[in-house]
Image: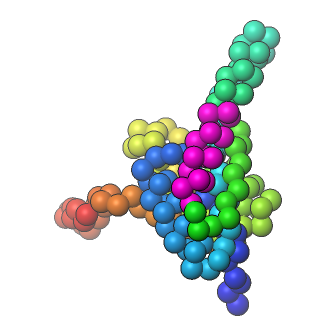
Amino acid sequence: MVKDIRTILVPIDFSASARSALDYAAMLAKRFDANIHLVHVCEVPPMMTIDAYAVASLDWNRKLGEAAERDLAQAASQLRDAKVTTEVLFGNPAKCIVTAATTNLADLVVMGTHGHGAVMHLLMGNVAERVVRTAPCPVLTVREAGEERQFVTGETSVRVA
């Protein structure tokens, strides 16, 4: 049995890919009369034990969170046809997104497939992939418009736009 879509969680890192996902989520929210919950995760380095560093880090986190809240409010204001809530979290992006989906009883997560580029993907892994594997609800991944895909079959490589 497929349950109704009432809450759509949209992780947003303010990249073009996340914007494409947000546009898609807005269309779904309008179609299903669903709410949108925007989540931005501020990834912070682990704290060191030096007190001065800890104080500087707390101030940095506060400023980072305030900037994210402003950006989320701006994104939310552009979604006129849906009830939108926002949340800024700190920590590992995939874990925070899955926790937010659980806490907010999300019926669907809509997220972009790429955020900060190929180098970050190699260094940190794919957040979307981790969310797909661990989320408590279905996850819809949305590619950025015009994003090129490459399929490798045997020794032949094919590019698809």
The image shows residue 41, relative to residue 51, as above or below, that is: below
Which corner quadrant holds the N terminus?
bottom right
The C terminus sits in image quarter: bottom left
> Can you tell which quarter of the image residue 29 is in?
bottom right
> Is residue 122 visible from the viewing direction of this image?
no
Query: Which one is nearer the viewer's eye here, 141 or 5?
Result: 5
Residue 56 percent location from the top left of the image: 71, 15
Q: Nearer the viewer, residue 107 or 85?
A: 85
Q: Is residue 123 above or below residue 57?
A: below
Q: Residue at x 70, y 43 (%)?
A: 88
Magenta stretch: dominant secondary structure: helix
Q: Is 52 situated above or below 158?
A: above
- Is 70 colored magenta in this rendering? yes
Residue 125, given in percent of the width and then of the height, sits at 52, 46
Tell me the residue at 29%/64% (across/down).
151
Residue at the (44%, 59%) spot, across then down? 20
Q: Is residue 69 in the magenta section?
A: yes
- Is 150 situated left or right of 96 in this image? left
Residue 34 seen in render: yes
| Residues rendered magenta in the picture | 65-79
